[in-house]
Amino acid sequence: MSNITNQSLSEILESIKSKKISSLELTQAYIKNIENAKKLNAFVTTTFDQALENAKKFDNKPNNEQLLSGVPLAVKDLFCTENVKTTAGSNILNNFVPSYESTVTKNLWNNGAFLLGKLNCDEFAMGSSNETSFFGNVINPIGDHLVPGGSSGGSSSALAADLTPATIGTDTGGSIRQPASFTGTVGLKPTYGLCSRWGIVAFASSLDQAGPMTKTVNDCSIMLEAMSGFDEKDSTSINKKKESYSKNLKDNIKGLKIGIPKEYRIDNMPKEIDELWEKGKKILKDLGAQLIDISLPHTKYALPTYYIVAPAEASSNLARYDGVRYGYRSQKGKDLIEMYENTRSEGFGDEVKRRILIGTYVLSSGYYDAYYLKAQKVRQLIKKDFDDSFTKVDAILTPSTPSSAFKIGEKTNDPVSMYLNDIFTVPVNLAGLPALSLPAGLDKQGYPLGLQLIGKALDEQKILNIGYAFEKNCGYKNEIKKWWS
Amino acid sequence: MSLDKEKIKHVAKLARISVDEAKVDSLTKDLNSIFKFIEQLNELNTDKVEPLTSILNQSLRSRTDEISDGKIREKILKNSPKKNEEFFVVPKVVE
């Protein structure tokens, strides 16, 4: 029981069900871990009193029929939580207390879980290192000088450090998969429309998607099952029958066709990433899958496309922060316009301002066709690349990131080098597809590296199955020394 | 194309963000490097490509136009930085 927080979500659920541990004891164990891990800066807000009360309530009247019975969960601070401050990592929302609950978190609570706290993230989810947060950077439990990835960096750090049994993040260009890769954990970006966007602080609406971050693939399937589902309040929510991802999890992948896209072997890619990819191919081949070389010819244009589409949508979404209806308001300025300008200048950080300016420019009169329309056309080509490939293969295997976790401060002065981190993850968002990042090995410094499985739209079950089989045969284990406590 | 300081100040005005004069130089440098990166797209001929406007193979749902909630004025006003009973308060706009 002293090691309960080391365990996977499914093991913890089993312990609760069999009364080996009470929900209260479990919650207390996580609270103790969180209090000892302040150095990681993974939390923006904790809700311990509320969590303890919910745990007691569960223990008094346990309902073990639910997917997440009696489990405390911390979530990214991009999900609106009723009566609990929701900041999106920004000064402009530093005082924002929603009067409503996001659909995805509500789904978790309806499945028996309760809130433990809100996790740090890059400001408005714009970043790949969790260094753009108003609340300071988060540290990777793998090493005190390393970033945890971003934008769901508080989520990846907290999960890897045993501060929550599982968590959720959001992924607009890689913000679940890249931090999962940097911390040796599992992260899934579901098909666009599978999880409701309602109540999630918006970044780029045609790309944003919430998803689970967990220690194992089985945990990932449980979380996805709990959080997904049709929602009338999201106009792009997909209306389909709910699937039992965890019940249907199978490790037999014999005969499945796995595509290997040649364009993902980029110039200057570290040898270790290439070796990791080879290792992944071998594992799947040994399990009876068939490897097929494919081509996704417009891969190199995905990032430039993303850096038009995402900022354009962000500039429009973030127009709502005007200092009038909610959020921060500047005291300076002699009229309404100056109040807006000062509020936004003082409330947003540098990266967010940069992206709003890019977005405003590419949508402005005279430039729309050259940038935004052009990007929408290239996005069509990128989607078509995937459509064509998926007539030949069941899933696609690629590295998750072009490197392991980098040092804090290493890329903050060069935005383009920071953006290049998402080179393998961004195409999937542009095409709306599901993709799973799996821990697959360590580099020579001992830092985790991940591999990515991309699936057809709504084919989450298949990539989870492949991931499940891969995990059993990969032998990866996160061994993190708790240097922070 | 390159963005000069004046253009950036104009875009900032459109975006309602005041830009600190001391930061304009570094902002100009950063934005130009980003646009240089973005402009790789010009290598592609897209004359015959339809723009992608929705990633889902479904059109947006419509619903009956009826009120489904209401009487939540207090909730809506709750987070306002400045309010006066039933209203949001802004700096004076008419003399």
Image (tube, coloured by chain):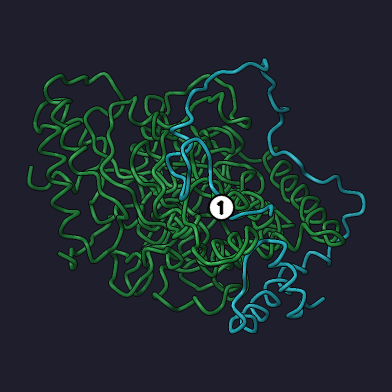
Location of residue A404 by image quarter? bottom left
**Chain shown in cyan:** B
Would residue A379 appear left or right of B20 to someone viewing this image? right
Secondary structure type for disc 1 = loop
Q: Nearer the viewer, residue A129 or A160?
A: A129
Query: Could you tell me which residue is drawn at 47 percent across and 27 percent down?
Result: B72
Residue shown at 70%/53% (left/top)?
Answer: A296
Choose top left, top right, bottom left or bottom right for residue A410: bottom left
For the residue pair A402 and A346, the one nearer the viewer reads as: A346
Chain drawn in green: A
Q: Where is residue B80 in the image (x, y as percent from the top left)?
A: 47, 45
The answer to whether residue A360 is above or below residue A397 is: below
Query: Tag 1: Cα neighbours inside 10 Å, few (<14), some, or many (≥20)?
Result: some
x and y, in percent, of residue A461 in the image: 48, 32
In this view of the protein, which residue sits in the foreground, A257 or A404? A404
Residue A226: percent from left, percent from top: 39, 29
Quadrant of res A266: bottom right
On the rendered structure, is B10 left or right of A188? right
Mark 1 residue type: Tyr
Q: In which quarter of the image is the N terminus of chain A?
A: top left
> Residue placed at 73% from the left, 67% from the top?
B11
Tag 1 subunit: A
Q: Position of residue A288 (x, y in %)?
A: 48, 41
Question: Relative to residue A338, is residue A110 depicted above or below?
Answer: above
Q: Left or right? Give the position of A32 relative to A408.
A: left
Residue that label 1 marks: A321
Q: Which residue ends up furthest to the right in the rendered image?
A: B47
The residue positioned 16% from the left and 30% from the top of the image is: A16
Q: Can residue A471 be seen in this view?
A: no
| Number of numbered discs | 1
